[in-house]
Image (spheres, grey):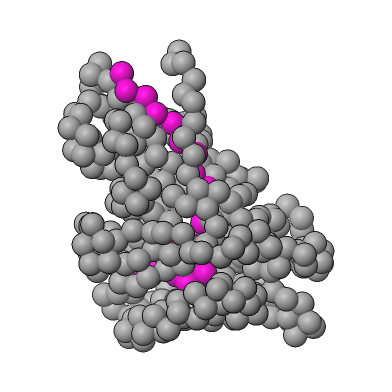
């Protein structure tokens, strides 16, 4: 029996990863830059044993179906191959989110699984190689290996595509991100399918790539200068450019709902009224508001005027991946 357990926090991209040049290896088209957060994380344990005849996957104590288990098995295969161990496994994953709002993240989930496999299989990976392994599970997971600001260097091969921390003199500790949870009944387009459809069909995709290269440079400079306004401006603008590509895809789609727009308008109105805050959005309707930590209570109270407290979650900068002690198996 080989056991391992790890905890990974989720991350939100300020400059988005949107599109792959290699779907098998999960090599992205552009560099991305994120902030790891403290409010959402996943703890995953894995036990490999020659006694198991197949892989089993429990998420939040629920046995998962074949499709969900297959995705995990595919990842386990990569880890097994690296270790030269070919035993099946039981994976138990627990998502810690303040409310049940569909916020489970593939970034924290796959990073925690990579961390657990690293321990269980005795891979002894450097953080760089752990980031590369996590990337194979879900692109954004490669950034959750580190805390604070993180940049994923796109690279051009499995060896050269991985995340690293962005030097910031702990400036991230002065920031906050408030999540506005938007209830949504529409059918999801997963980030994986959405970005591929955009790469394949969006009229604006090349312009997105050009813009993302410029935006990431601006974000790096803003972090180096600890310039909140510059970081906020490029964060919001980059998100809008990413979302613009989906409207020009075929068939077209959007992650925005009327309430997402309400939230985005609110943030812009608050800014016009002198508040220091900017939004970003990912492959779903939730809106995330970046602001200085010292202003976060004021921003939160202002958002409460339009969104009930159970739809608001305050987050701050989070840590990198951690190894955990495994409870004795029952
Ligand atoms: C919009 O990492 O979920 O959140 O690599 O296909 O698993 P796969 O995609 P995923 O995509 C995240 C897309 C995004 C932007 C970002 O996190 O950079």
Number of numbered callouts drawn:
0
Q: Residue lying farthest front? A: 169
Query: Image point 31% across, 52% down: which residue?
Result: 132
Relative placement, left or right, of 100 versus 47 is: right
Q: Is residue 88 left or right of residue 275?
A: left
Determine the residue located farthest toward the top in the rendered image.
Answer: 330
- Report the side of 87 relative to 126 (left or right): left
Residue 58 seen in render: no
Q: Residue at x 59, y 63 (%)?
A: 169
**207 vs 4: above or below:** below
Quarter of the image where one finds residue 288:
bottom right
Seen from the viewer's position, the closer of residues 20 and 218 is 218
> Where does the image place residue 183, in percent across and percent down from the top left?
61, 58
Residue 81: x %, y % from top left: 18, 38
Image quarter hosting the N terminus? top left
Residue 211 rendering spot, x and y as whole percentages: 41, 84
Magenta stretch, main secondary structure, is strand
| Quadrant of the snapshot with the C terminus | top left
Magenta stretch in the rendered image: 1-19
Magenta highlight on residue 224: no
Residue in the foreground of this view, choosing between 232 and 91: 232
**At 80% across and 83% down in the image, what residue appears?**
273
Can residue 184 be seen? yes
Q: Is residue 217 above or below residue 51?
A: below
Seen from the viewer's position, the closer of residues 7 and 51 is 7
Would you place residue 149 above or below residue 310 in this image? below
The part of the image, by quadrant, that contains residue 242 is: bottom left
Q: Percent position (x, y) of residue 110?
A: 40, 46
Magenta stretch holds residue 5: yes
Query: Looking at the image, which residue is at 41% across and 53% down?
Result: 141
């Amino acid at each position: 029996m080989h056991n391992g357990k790890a905890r990974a926090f989720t991350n939100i991209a300020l400059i988005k990863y949107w599109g792959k040049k290699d779907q098998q290896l999960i090599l992205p088209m552009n560099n991305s830059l994120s902030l790891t957060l403290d409010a959402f994380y996943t703890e995953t344990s894995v036990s490999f044993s020659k006694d198991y005849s197949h892989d089993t996957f429990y998420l939040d104590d629920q046995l998962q179906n074949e499709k969900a288990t297959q995705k995990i098995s595919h990842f386990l295969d990569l880890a097994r191959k690296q270790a030269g161990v070919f035993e099946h496994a039981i994976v138990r994953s627990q998502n810690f989110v303040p409310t049940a709002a569909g916020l489970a993240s593939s970034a924290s989930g796959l990073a925690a699984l990579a961390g657990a496999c690293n321990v269980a299989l005795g891979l002894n990976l450097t953080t760089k190689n752990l980031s590369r392994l996590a990337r194979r599970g879900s692109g954004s997971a490669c950034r959750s290996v580190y805390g604070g600001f993180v940049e994923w260097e796109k690279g051009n091969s499995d060896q050269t595509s991985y995340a690293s921390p962005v030097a910031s003199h702990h400036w991230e500790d002065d920031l906050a991100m408030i999540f506005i949870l938007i209830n949504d009944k529409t059918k999801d387009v997963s980030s994986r399918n959405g970005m591929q459809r955009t790469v394949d069909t969006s009229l604006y995709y090349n312009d997105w790539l050009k813009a993302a290269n410029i935006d990431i440079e601006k974000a790096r400079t803003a972090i180096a200068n600890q310039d909140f306004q510059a970081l906020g401006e490029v964060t919001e603008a980059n998100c809008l450019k990413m979302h613009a590509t989906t409207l020009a895809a075929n068939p077209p789609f959007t992650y925005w709902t009327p309430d997402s727009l309400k939230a985005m308008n609110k943030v812009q109105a608050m800014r016009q009224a002198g508040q220091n805050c900017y939004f970003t959005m990912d492959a779903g309707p939730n809106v995330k508001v970046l602001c200085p930590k010292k202003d976060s209570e004021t921003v939160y109270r202002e958002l409460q005027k339009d969104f009930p407290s159970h739809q608001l979650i305050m987050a701050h900068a989070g840590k990198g991946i951690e190894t955990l002690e495994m409870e004795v198996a029952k």
